[in-house]
Structure formats: C-alpha cells, structure tokens
Image: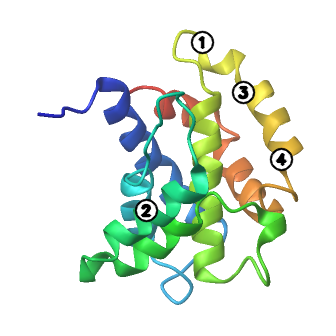
Amino acid sequence: MNTISSSGIWYVVNNFNCKPKITKTTGINEKTATIENIFIASLLHDIGKKIDSDENIDYELQCIRGEMLVQKIPMLKDASKIIRYHFLDWKDWKGSIDKPLTISSQIILLANFVDMMISRDRYILHQVDNIWQELFRLEDGILSSKVVEGFKKISIQEEFWFDLTSY
C-alpha cells in the first residue's frame, strides 16, 4: 500500500494555495481557463513520473504518460492537456500566453519551480530574495513574464510566504 508522505501532502496544499491566486492576478477567467482544471492538473501533474535505476527523470516521457493516464477519465480530459505541457518552456510555446493551455501550464511550471526552491529547514523570508532572483533568471526563456508578474503581485506580502510554508 502506498501512502503520501507529509511533504507530499504539503506539496499538494502548497500548489492549491498558490495557483488559484496567480490565475486571479493574471486575468484568467472562465473563458480562458478554469481554476478547477489548473487545480486538478496541479494535483496530478507528476502522475506519469517513473524514475529509472539511476534516479534519472525523463520529464517529457513523464508528461506524456501523465496525459495518457488522466485523459482516460472523461471529466479530467482538459486537465490532462495541462499535465502534458506543464514542463514546456515558454520559449517553446507558439502563440499567445493568453491561450488557456499555455497559461495554465506555465502557472504549474512556476509553482513547481517555487516549490523546489524552498528549503523547509530555513526561515522562508530569508529565502525570498534568492527565489526571486531565480524566477527573474527564468523569465522569458523558461517562464512567461506575464505569469512571473502575476506571481510577483501575489507574493509581495510576507504573509503569502508564511501561508505557503505553514503546512
């Protein structure tokens, strides 16, 4: 029987708290993407992960596997596309960030980066500057500037970082 570790539960809660706030500040509405699909994709985005004996992760294959698993459930079909493209760099997208699939996938990618950058054994406010330096480095190549700007708007307050790490 598999169980979710406390850090895994924290990750789910972290993504749930983070992504809907970003969608509100980036102007996503029901016509462009649904917060529900982003939330579902954030919960299931690593479902296709398979680590080989050398602990290497093939992210493209992980995303394809994840999409294939999730699209089998009719009510999750829209989220499956987000799962498929959540590791695609901004520079590799064709077209506008305002497309639902594009912005949804970029939001999950940004939240994933933020989650990986946070050290649970250090005071969060001592990490914020380094996190921002890294996000600015990733902007316009890996991450869309619109998504980074949306995240900046919601994370300017210290309470955001406390809420993000309180689980």
Q: CA distance from mark 1 to mark 4?
A: 23 Å
Looking at numbered disc 3 in the image, what kind of residue is underneath it? Val
Residue 95 makes an appearance in the image? yes
Report the disc number at residue 166: none
- Which of discs 1 and 2 lies nearer the camera? The answer is 2
Q: x and y percent of residue 97 in the render?
A: 74, 76
- Which of discs 4 and 2 lies nearer the camera? The answer is 2
- Which of discs 3 and 4 lies nearer the camera? The answer is 4
Report how many numbered discs are placed on residues in the image.
4
Report the disc number at residue 123: 1
**Which quarter of the rendering shows the N terminus?**
top left
Find disc 2 in the rendering and name its residue: 65
- Which of discs 3 and 2 lies nearer the camera? The answer is 2
Q: Earlier in the sequence, mark 1 or mark 4?
A: 1
Q: Earlier in the sequence, mark 3 or mark 4?
A: 3
Residue 31 left/right relative to 94: left
Residue in view at x 40 percent, y 61 percent: 39
Looking at numbered disc 1 in the image, what kind of residue is underneath it? Tyr
Residue toward you, 124 or 139: 139
- Check whether the beta carbons of the residues at disc 4 and disc 2 lie within 8 A of each other: no
Relative to residue 129, is residue 47 depicted above or below? below
Callout 1: few (<14), some (14-19), or many (20+) C-alpha neighbours within 10 Å? few
Q: Earlier in the sequence, mark 1 or mark 2?
A: 2
Find disc 4 in the rendering and name its residue: 138
- Check whether the beta carbons of the residues at disc 1 and disc 2 lie within 8 A of each other: no
Q: CA distance from mark 4 to mark 2?
A: 26 Å
Q: x and y percent of residue 94 in the render?
A: 79, 81
